[in-house]
Image (cartoon, rainbow, N blue to C red):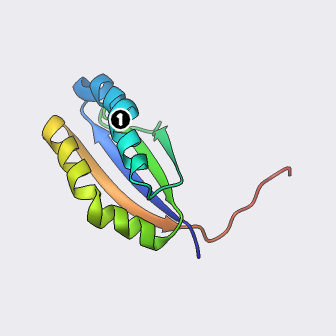
Amino acid sequence: MSKILYNVTVSLEPEIHDEWLQWMREKHIPEVLATGCFLENRMLRILNEEDNGITYAMQYLAPSMEQYQRYIHEHAPALRGDAEARFANKFAAFRTVLTLVDHQIVGS
């Protein structure tokens, strides 16, 4: 069974950046990982930003599609609602679900 990568790309208005980043590190990401649906996560800042926006990609690795689906059905609505309540109309999120097709390591 292939692992599933759940990617959430978030574009922020600059005035919420610092508060949002602290909230992600201290509250949201720990709560997502506490669901037990993911093995690990990464937070990446996208460097080729346009229109003075600030954009991040959060990546969560699920051990299976079943665990990802469990997260989406049992946990995601409340966690997304928390973000909406806190940062209403100050961000946009785009979600993708991926599975690894090929993997190569150079120099190993």
Q: Position of residue 29 (x, y in %)?
A: 39, 41
**Residue positioned most to the bottom:** 1
The answer to whether residue 87 is seen in the rendering is: no
Compared to residue 14, the image places residue 92 above or below, namely below
Nearer-the-camera pick, 23 or 45: 23
Q: Position of residue 49 (x, y in %)?
A: 39, 38
Q: Residue 74: which quarter of the image? A: bottom left
Q: Is residue 50 left or right of residue 66?
A: left
- The three-letter amino acid code for the residue at tag 1 is Met
Residue drawn at point x = 40 percent, y = 40 percent: 30
Residue drawn at point x = 35 percent, y = 26 percent: 22
Q: Position of residue 34 (x, y in %)?
A: 41, 47
Q: Position of residue 83 (x, y in %)?
A: 22, 42
Q: How many marks?
A: 1
Using a 10 Å C-alpha cutoff, classify the residue at mark 1 as few (fewer than 14 neighbours), some (14 to 19) or many (20 or more).
some
Residue beneath disc 1: 24
Nearer-the-camera pick, 22 or 97: 22
Compared to residue 24, the image places residue 81 above or below, namely below
The answer to whether residue 54 is seen in the rendering is: yes
Image quadrant holding the N terminus, namely: bottom right
Compared to residue 95, the image places residue 58 above or below, namely above
